[in-house]
Image (tube, rainbow, N blue to C red):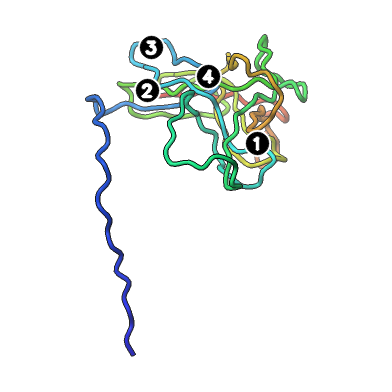
């Protein structure tokens, strides 16, 4: 008895991409959620500012992470019209719905969420610490804010650090839902209380070194 062996045929190589500018070979990149700019630091530069997006809160599938979408998409091969595969939605702040808006003085409920991708040239490590407003010794604080994610009854996502002084996307105050950001509260039990407090909104800080 003989067995046939499948030998895949390698296609021709693709086109070479454009050569980027010379870099310094180091640094780190992070997303500043809720802002359109990076911290005022001579060593931190804005890669691009964009729009927060993700899967629809009511869908059971799709991506499980938030993304920072560019404002000017570039298209490849496409088929217009929905084919029922996967979808990308914009994102909205969901604060004040339950009376817990940690962003005092900022009315952001149902507003679209901006984001900024930041590059730190001189510090190669990055870290988001939940439930802290300060960084460990030797680390630089990039920004601080509040921990946010999807509602516990909805589509599962990730925890991100929303800037404590959030901005909104101009013209984006329309309640169309999509991906949503809710404040995260402490829930005692396996989470030790004290030091945590039942129902208290959790802070966060993004650090680099």
Q: Dot 1 corresponds to which residue?
A: 192
Please report the residue visible at 57 percent of the width from the left and 23 percent of the height from the top: 162
> Observer-nearest residue: 15 or 35?
15
Q: Is residue 18 left or right of residue 101?
A: left
Identify the residue shown where x is 30% and y is 65%.
8
Q: Which numbered disc, 1 or 4, marks the residue closer to the eye?
A: 4
**In this rendering, position of residue 161 left or right of residue 186:** left
**Residue 147: image location, x then y, percent:** 59, 27
The residue indicated by pointer 4 is: 144
As measured in the structure, the alpha-carbon distance from the residue carrying label 1 to the one carrying label 4 is 23 Å
Task: Decide which of 172, 63 is in the foreground and name it.
Answer: 172
How far apart are labels 3 and 2 at the CA level? Answer: 11 Å
Marks 4 and 3, how far apart at CA: 15 Å
Residue with the mark numbered 2: 119
Q: Earlier in the sequence, mark 4 or mark 2?
A: 2
Which mark lies nearer to you, 3 or 1?
3
């Amino acid at each position: 008895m003989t067995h046939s062996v499948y030998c895949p045929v390698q296609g021709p190589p693709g086109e070479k991409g454009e050569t980027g500018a010379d870099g310094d070979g180091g640094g780190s990149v992070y997303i500043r959620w809720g802002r359109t700019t990076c911290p005022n630091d001579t060593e931190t530069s804005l890669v691009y500012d964009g729009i927060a997006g993700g899967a629809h809160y009511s869908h059971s599938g799709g991506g499980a992470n938030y993304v920072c979408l560019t404002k000017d998409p570039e298209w490849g091969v496409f088929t217009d019209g929905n084919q029922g595969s996967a979808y990308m939605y914009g994102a909205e702040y969901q604060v004040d719905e339950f009376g817990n808006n940690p962003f005092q003085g900022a009315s952001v409920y149902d507003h679209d969420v901006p984001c900024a991708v930041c590059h730190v040239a001189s510090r190669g490590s990055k870290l988001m610490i939940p439930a802290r407003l300060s960084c460990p010794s030797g680390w630089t604080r990039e920004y601080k804010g509040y921990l946010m994610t999807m509602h516990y009854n909805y589509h599962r996502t990730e925890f991100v650090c929303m800037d404590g002084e959030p901005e909104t996307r101009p013209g984006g105050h329309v309640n169309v839902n999509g991906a949503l950001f809710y404040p995260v509260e402490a829930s005692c039990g396996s989470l030790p209380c004290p030091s945590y407090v039942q129902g208290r909104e959790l802070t966060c800080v993004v650090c680099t070194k």
